[in-house]
Amino acid sequence: MNRRDFLKTAIASAGTVALPTAQARDPKQMPEKAVGMLYDSTLCIGCKACVAACKSANNMPPANDAPDLKKWNNANTWDTPLDISGYTLNVIKVYKEHDNASNKDQDYAFMKRHCLHCVDPSCVSVCPVSAMRKDTTTGVVTYNPDACIGCRYCVLGCPFSVPQFQYDTPFPRIQKCQFCEHLQKQGKLPACVDVCPTGASLFGDAKQLLEEAKRRLAKKSGETYVFPRGKLGSEERPPHEAQVPQYQQHVYGEKEAGGTQVIYLSGVPFQKLGLPTNLPDYSYAVVTESIQHTLYKGMIAPLALLGGLVYFAKRNADKHDEEDKS
Amino acid sequence: MSAHADHAAPVGGRILTVPFLILGMFALIAAYFLILRFIFGLEAAANINNGYPWGIWVTMDVVVGTAFGCGGFVMAFLVYILNKGKYHPLIRPAVMAGLFGYTLGGMAVFFDLGRYWQMYNVFLPWYMHFNSVMLEVALCVATYVVVLWIEFTPVFLEKIGFNNLKQKLEKVLFFFIGLGVLLPVMHQSSLGTMMLGAGYKLHPLWNTVLLPLLFLSSAIIMGYSIVIFESIFAAAGLKRPQETHILAPLSNILWWLLLFFLAVRIVDLLWRGVLPNLDWQGFWFLVELALFVIPLAFLSKNHQTARVLFLSGFCLLLAGTLYRINVYLIGFTAGTSGWNYFPSVPEILVTIGVFSFEIMLYLIFVKKLPVLASPQH
């Protein structure tokens, strides 16, 4: 290999940077037995029972977030979360078009914010130490503090800005909803679903939930529909009959960022609920991993480059030794 | 580090000068705020939040700091791989700049990491996640810091007179030189790939799959720029003759690299049909572009004076720095949440302290160790 050949190889391997699809990493598919949640904003009455239940089920402290309530709440006895944070995994927020909003799902609407448990999660892809993992059976995205180094790449990488880091403690961790994995293992429902009085948060098989969401969208507004509660397909809890509202004709999470196991229905545009509506139908993990796989597949290109570099470094060093001797 | 090493000599002179003490003061201020950070958490010193989890400590100390350290590998490539011996006098200071840039970058990672006490997890095979761009960056940077210290060891050995050991080390140094070129190529490009993970949160002006290529080529540009800048600044500051005769041909290489970078950058934008708007991001994009284009005009002349070289080098260091700040901070938005970020005063003081500490180390090393080419030669 002479220098020209080497340079050609070097340029060719550098050139592969420009061809990121050369080793495209396929989008990940949802596991067969993936569990999920359907949050129907139109059913939510904003009672926040799920926020309280989530706190106690996950041993989370009250969050003293609301500035105008702080002076009333010195002892931090009230939980006043404004959004998810390092101390709140789940929160109900309200969208209001204006101060006197009074028409539900038109000029105001509720929104439940927590992890969407992506089919192809960015947080799992970016994490250097496998602290974020996706369960291969249930598809639940979990966090392992023993692995985590606190780099916050998951915070940056999540398209839904879900993982929350604790900036106010010397021994922080990431906090995110893990779908009450500990309760699910005991055959129980996630705490937020368990206490939801209207079935706005509905648990179940992720694929069946998508069908349920589409069934609702197929109904005309004003028709009566039997809304299940608790777990979809389970007879344990009585359903309730109600009129079908005016839905946005879109299931949020069916395709967004490669699909999510938590999906949303809403009466107002999803953007107003704070959900990003400019997401591609693939995960950003596909982009970065395709680039990495193209450049580093089997470490062949780097090793070839190293071989060439070491060869010339050695040859030039030998040449200089000879010059010094002569 | 091998051939012609005998030409380098310590500059000598007092260590405790007034500039040195001022730098020391900044380093102490940084240390104070870092103590607060370790007692009370990151919030005590930095304004980073869950919308902007990476602030200037990541951007300046690590991403920009290591790019400043790229002088070492780009000069090693020129001198040891392409065998351009005439640049040899520039190699020791360049490798040393790399040594400091990367060692302090690693240090900054330590105090920026939330769970720093588990930092070693990146080296534990059962935790490693090979699809993560950051794992690759972490392993490459960690290895490269070790390689840089090995590359620099002959200087220490020369100083303490262990010439036998030095010769033995130099026999195997070619391997580390090769590795020392490969590793920065890998992680400097990956620092670009890393921000593709942010997806739509990164502004279209910077959001391109060519980020790895643009980060690598701008790191190389910054590498040659720091060599030129450092040489002229050191010659003026330490009252030594200028090395313009070797810096001028170096600036030629720089000109071609710059042309390549700008061509890729502009063709990519046109290809994707992205033009700057009249907003905050658009403004900084134009400043960035100007900082790259102005030196291109400067360096196209045939006869370069030390002044032109110095200004071009300085301009390009600013350009590369702003490009990185644009990708990591200005072009980054917090998604749909309403977060804002501007660095706090303590946060800025820590970054100033880190760079001050770097310059202090530089002054100690060039005065006490055979790093700079001796002027009488």
Image (spheres, coloured by chain):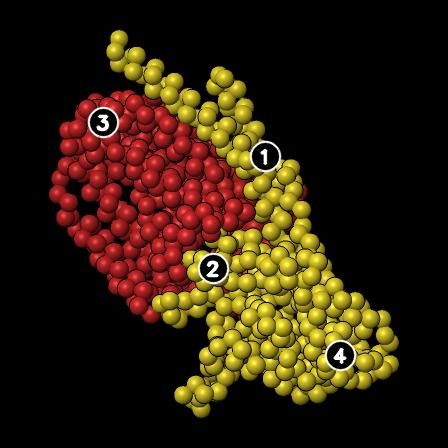
Residue at x-position 19% and y-position 29%: B158
Which chain is displayed in red in the rendered image?
B
- Element at label 2: loop
Q: Tell me how far mark 2 sits from mark 3, CA to CA.
A: 42 Å
* Quarter of the figure with the C terminus of chain A: top left
Q: Amino acid at mark 2?
A: Arg
Q: Read off the residue under disc 2.
A: A152
Q: Read off the residue under disc 4.
A: A235
Chain bearing tag 1 is: A
Quick check: marks 1 and 2 in contact, CB under 8 Å? no
Q: Tell me how far mark 1 sits from mark 4, CA to CA.
A: 56 Å
Chain bearing tag 3 is: B
**Which mark is first along the chain, 4 or 1?**
1
Residue at x-position 19% and y-position 24%: B164
Between residue B231 and residue A93, name the one nearer to us.
Answer: A93
Quick check: marks 1 and 4 in contact, CB under 8 Å? no
Which chain is displayed in yellow in the rendered image?
A
| Badge nearest the viewer, 1 or 2 | 2
Dot 1, how many residues are within 10 Å of its Cα: few (below 14), some (14-19), or many (20+)?
some
| Badge nearest the viewer, 1 or 4 | 4
Is residue B204 visible to the viewer in this orientation of the structure? Answer: no
Instruction: Where is residue A47? Give x, y as percent.
Output: 63, 86
| Badge nearest the viewer, 4 or 3 | 4
- Element at label 4: loop
Answer with the quarter of the image where residue A111 lies.
bottom right
Answer with the quarter of the image where residue B226 lies.
top left
Instruction: Where is residue B258? Give x, y as percent.
Output: 49, 35
Q: Read off the residue under disc 3.
A: B166
Q: Read off the residue under disc 1.
A: A16
- Element at label 1: helix
